[in-house]
Structure formats: structure tokens, C-alpha cells
Image (cartoon, rainbow, N blue to C red):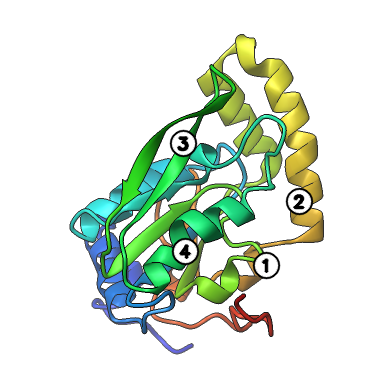
Amino acid sequence: MGTRTADAPDALDPRAELDALAAELRALPPSCGPVRLVAVDGHAGSGKTTFAGRLSAALGGAPVVHLDDLATHAEPFEWCGRLRAQVLEPLAVGRGARYAVYDWTLRRFAGTAAVPLAPVVLVEGVGAGRRAVRPWLSRLVWMELDAATARRRGEQRDGPRLAEFWAGWAVAESAHFAADPSRPYAATVVDGVTGRIAPSTVGEPSTIPLTCGVARK
């Protein structure tokens, strides 16, 4: 790796570090029509939504697709078809997208969210870097926080009324990542506690091709 200079990513302050990542993402080749699609993945409670918001701001207001809007109580991970049809395929042909938003209180889809065409679009949520999505991605970002710590943080955030939900979710999430891990494909890793970007993952490509030999359909 060699010795890093004062201008290297690990020497930057947090804001400059984020700006450096934003500049790097803008320079990537488009992966979904004219769009550079960037996934922010990690365990529930690892800080994905917060980091995606910060990265969106650093990108000048890049659109963010929240996978919690596409998942449901009955189908926590069976949202790939909705994501592809409502978001990825429109972006791939150079059109803005609009997707149905699931209401977790009403337990049904209610309302929609717009995804304007932009140079970079973020997709954040558990499983954002899964096998079915990776062929569409320019970059996969992973929030580095172990499952147990992330769950404790999520439970503290949501309170006792969602304890039963978290118990069921933990089982589903564990099964998902066991069958379809995202972490090995991440070219950028972010500390889930501090929000700092791991120095060795800025400006360096993933060692495993994002497409993994899977063709888009």
C-alpha cells in the first residue's frame, strides 16, 4: 500500500473525507443508463440512512431510494421486483422514476416517492448490495457494524413496542446475509459507529467484480 501523505483519504477530516468520496462516485462510469447507482448496505441499525443522507448532501442532493419503502411485513426481502420495475428500469432508459411507498402502520402501500434522474442515485437499506442488484451498481458501500450491536442500537431507537418486530427481523436478516452476503463486494466501508470511511476503501476498487457474472434482465 505504501505510506500515505497528508493528502491521502485517511488524513482528511470527516467532511473532506465525504467530499472526496462524493467526487470519486461522480467520476465512476454510469451503471444504470446515465445514472451511477450506489448502494448503502449493512445490518439494520448500522447507520445506513444517516450516512446515505450525509452522502446525498455531499453529492448536492442526490436522490435516495429507501428500501424500507419497498419492503413489507410479509416480504422483508422480496422487494427486488418492485425495485427493478419501478426504479431501475426507468432510470436505465434515462427517465425519472416513481415508486409505491409501504406504510408500516397501515400495513399497505400508500403514496409514492419520486426519484429524479441524476448523475448519482443512492439506494439504502438492508440488502441494497444483494446479488440481484449488484449488476446495476457503480459502487457498493458497506456500513461496518456487527449484527448484535446494530440490533441493540435499533432496539434502543425504536423502543419496546417494536421488540417483537426486531426479533423476527433478526432471523430474516441473518438468513438473508447467510445466503446472499453483500460485505465481500463492498469497495467502500464505513465505520457504523463513527461514520468515518475506512482509508483503504477510498479510491480503490473492489477485489470482486460487482456483476459476479449475473446478467441484467
Residue 132 visible, this orientation: yes
Q: CA distance from mark 1 to mark 3?
A: 23 Å
Quadrant in the picture for the C terminus: bottom right
Q: Earlier in the sequence, mark 2 or mark 4?
A: 4
- Of residues 68 and 170, the one drawn nearer to the viewer in this rendering: 68
Q: Earlier in the sequence, mark 4 or mark 1?
A: 4
- Of residues 182 and 195, the one drawn nearer to the viewer in this rendering: 182
The kind of residue on which mark 3 rests is Val
Q: CA distance from mark 2 to mark 1?
A: 11 Å
Q: Looking at the picture, does residue 39 appear above or below residue 53?
A: below
The kind of residue on which mark 2 rests is His
The kind of residue on which mark 1 rests is Arg
Find residue 176 and name its label.
2
* Residue at the spot of label 1: 131
Q: Earlier in the sequence, mark 3 or mark 2?
A: 3
* Residue at the spot of label 3: 101
Which element is circle 1 on? loop
Number of other residues with Cα within 10 Å of mark 3, as a class: few under 14, some 14 to 19, many 20 or more: some
Q: Looking at the picture, does residue 123 appear above or below residue 90?
A: above
Circles 2 and 4: CB atoms closer than 8 Å: no
Q: CA distance from mark 2 to mark 4?
A: 21 Å
The kind of residue on which mark 4 rests is Leu
Q: Position of residue 159 (x, y in %)?
A: 57, 14
Q: CA distance from mark 3 to mark 2?
A: 22 Å
Number of other residues with Cα within 10 Å of mark 4, as a class: few under 14, some 14 to 19, many 20 or more: many
Q: Position of residue 203 (x, y in %)?
A: 39, 80
Which element is circle 4 on? helix
| Residue under the point 48% across and 43% down | 193
Find residue 88 and name its label.
4
Check the image and name the residue furthest to the left.
60
Q: Earlier in the sequence, mark 2 or mark 1?
A: 1
Q: Which of pointers 3 and 2 indicates the residue nearer the eye?
A: 3
